Amino acid sequence: MNQEPNQFVEQSRQASEATQRLKKRMIIVLICLAVFAVISLLLISWLEKLEETPQQEPIVTQKPNTFIPYEPDWDLDIMKDPGYLAMDRTVYYCDSRYGITEVLDEKSKDKYGPAVSLLNDMIGYIIHGDHESYNTLFSENYFKTEGNEPEEPFTMQQLYDIKLTLIQETEKSENGQRYTQYEFEVEYRIRHNNGTFRTDIDEGESRKQYFILSDSTSNAVLIDQILGYVYKS
């Protein structure tokens, strides 16, 4: 007489176990899909990075066939040029590690450390055509590299759309000496580029440079390398 109830209980138990197995399979499938999605996103990001990678040698400025320089005017005060003053001349600091973007000025430039302060000063020297102050920003290691010479005089440069992006900051040790190395992407456009400072940027064009800075040869942070980018078609 108890056979039918027992059979019902057994069927219920089997149905419950089947449901649990189905749930486990669904969870496994969902986990696999999530892992596949993450791997796909990482692969896409990696492929995009391949499109522009820093050169392993300091940049050598070369004049592209399309570059047509404006006539240099050594007496021009670009800070009185309404066309230039209408451009976005703000210097933006980005920290790629945390996804933050801030506006830099004379009051805030020191807030983010010596490397950011130096690069902000560098932008000011370029804009004001101050090649002597510009040359003080480079380390002994920079000038030891073949092809790296002090910058010759250049006119005031109409820089705009300026961005300094921190890629990474690393504590290093070499020959018993500890120092900090900073890696930045620096980009800007040059309105009415006359070629006295850079001959690799056309009108309205922006070409990133990869800066490596450290305090390895001085008590102050200086620029050790400037690398260009190789753009793959």
Image (cartoon, grey):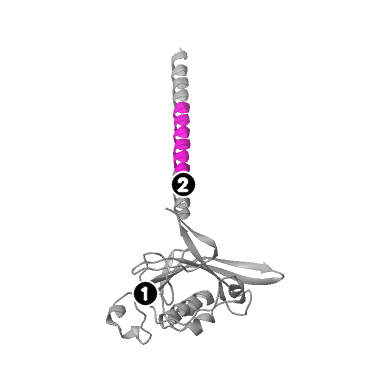
Q: Where residue 40 appears, x then y in whole percent?
A: 45, 45
Range of residues picked out in magenta: 16-36
Residue ranking furthest to the bottom: 75
Q: Residue furthest top?
A: 1
Q: Type of residue at label 2?
A: Val
**Measured Cα–Cα span from mark 2 to mark 1:** 43 Å
The residue that appears at 46% across and 42% down in the rendered structure is 36
Relative depth, front residue between 223 and 154: 154
Where is residue 65 drawn, in percent x and y? 39, 64
Asked if residue 33 lies in the magenta stretch, the reply is: yes
Horizontally, is 182 left or right of 217 in the view?
A: left
Kind of residue indicated by mark 1: Asn
The verdict on residue 221 being magenta is no
The residue labelled by disc 1 is 193
Magenta portion: prevailing SS class: helix
- Residue at 43% x, 19% y is 8
Local secondary structure at mark 2: helix
Q: Residue at x 61, y 76 (%)?
A: 140
> Which residue is under mark 2?
38
Q: Nearer the viewer, residue 11 or 33?
A: 33
* Residue 63: % across, % down: 43, 68
